[in-house]
Image: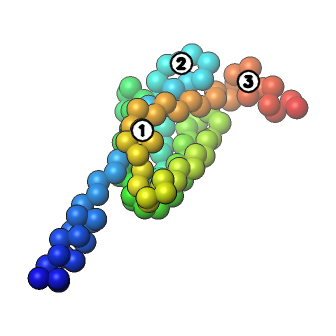
Amino acid sequence: MKSQFIFIILLLCSCTNNRFYARVYDYDTDRPIKNVNININGDTTQTDSTGYFSMKVKSNFPCTIFLQRKGYASKKIFRKPDSLGQFSKKNLENNSIYLFNKESEFSNKIRNQ
């Protein structure tokens, strides 16, 4: 009986399906950016034509999200789970990420400082 209980607990823990959802936008125009290369802890994907992507993340490990596209400054984002070792729904869904065009005024100000 005890071993069945442990098996059920392990099964439930392994079924945690956390996905990180986001859209990537141009900072200056607020338009979605397609074909942005996304790397989350070694797994890769790209944004679609609406700037959207989703990717599975491990529930109890921090993740590093690296975004890169030609003509834009690369961006690295760090996410870590809460005190219970889980990502909250708020932390995983409906994220908006902005990239700076290398030719934007903002990027030029940073380079000239």
Q: Is residue 112 above or below residue 92?
A: above
Residue 14 x %, y %: 27, 65
Residue 105 in view in this figure: yes
Rendered image: mark on residue 30: 2
Name the residue at 47% across, 45% down: 38
Rendered image: mark on residue 16: none
Rendered image: mark on residue 90: 1
10 Å neighbourhood of mark 2: few (<14), some, or many (≥20)?
A: few
Rendered image: mark on residue 106: 3
Tell me where residue 90 sits by quadrant: top left
Residue 1 or residue 24, whichever sits in front: 1
Determine the CA span between mark 2 and mark 1.
Answer: 22 Å
Residue 67 or residue 69, whichever sits in front: 67
Front disc: 3 or 1 = 1
In this figure, what is the number of numbered marks?
A: 3
The local secondary structure at tag 1 comes to helix
Callout 3–callout 1 Cβ contact below 8 Å = no
Name the residue at 70% across, 24% down: 103
The local secondary structure at tag 3 comes to helix
Name the residue at 49% across, 57% down: 83
Q: Mark 1 is on which residue type? A: Lys
Query: Residue extending furthest right?
Result: 113
Of callouts 2 and 1, which one flags the residue occurring earlier in the amino acid sequence? 2
Query: Residue extending furthest front?
Result: 1
Residue 71 x %, y %: 61, 32
Q: Mark 3 is on which residue type? A: Phe
Determine the CA span between mark 3 and mark 2.
Answer: 14 Å
10 Å neighbourhood of mark 3: few (<14), some, or many (≥20)?
A: few
